[in-house]
Amino acid sequence: MSAAASPQDSRDIAAEVTGSLARMLGRAPETFSPTTRLVQDLDFDSTNVLELLMRVEADLGVEFDPDTFGPSAFETVDSLVGYVRRHLDA
């Protein structure tokens, strides 16, 4: 059996990220899908992205290196979840 994360781990990270986003925007987590686009659908700007990143850091008890993320990490909810997973697996 490989040391890769199980699908359950992925769902937990997705739930944490979606929960952080929901708390930030005052919406129910169910209103976001993996394909929800942060800029186009939620009108995020760079300040919103930073706020979300800080919330995810606080909620997960981690710190991200700002040099490791770029615009592609914040395209959709799913791309942000992927960024967080890669960081946690590193």
Image (tube, rainbow, N blue to C red):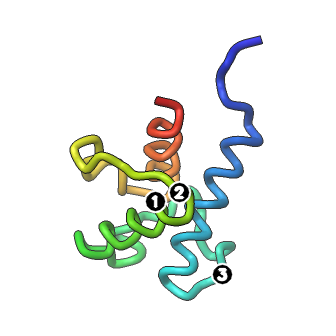
| Residue that carries the numbered disc 3 in the rendered image | 28
Q: CA distance from mark 1 to mark 2?
A: 6 Å
Quarter of the image for the N terminus: give it.
Answer: top right
Q: CA distance from mark 1 to mark 3?
A: 20 Å
Q: Amino acid at mark 2?
A: Gly
Apparent side of residue 71 relative to residue 6 in the rendered image (left or right):
left
Density class for disc 2 (Cα within 10 Å; few <14, some 14-19, many ≥20) is few
Q: Would you place residue 4 above or below residue 20 in this image? A: above
In the structure shown, which secondary structural element does the residue marked by tag 3 occupy?
loop
Q: Which mark is residue 57?
A: 1
Apparent side of residue 11 relative to residue 38 in the rendered image (left or right):
right
Mark 3 and 2 residues: CB-CB less than 8 Å, in contact?
Answer: no
| Residue that carries the numbered disc 2 in the rendered image | 61
**Image point (61%, 69%), residue name:** 19
**Image point (46%, 69%), residue name:** 55
Which residue is situated farthest in the bottom direction here? 26
**Image point (42%, 64%), residue name:** 37
Which residue is situated farthest in the top direction here? 1
Q: Amino acid at mark 3?
A: Ala
Density class for disc 1 (Cα within 10 Å; few <14, some 14-19, many ≥20) is some
Q: CA distance from mark 3 to mark 2?
A: 22 Å
Which of the pair 87/27 is nearer the observer?
87
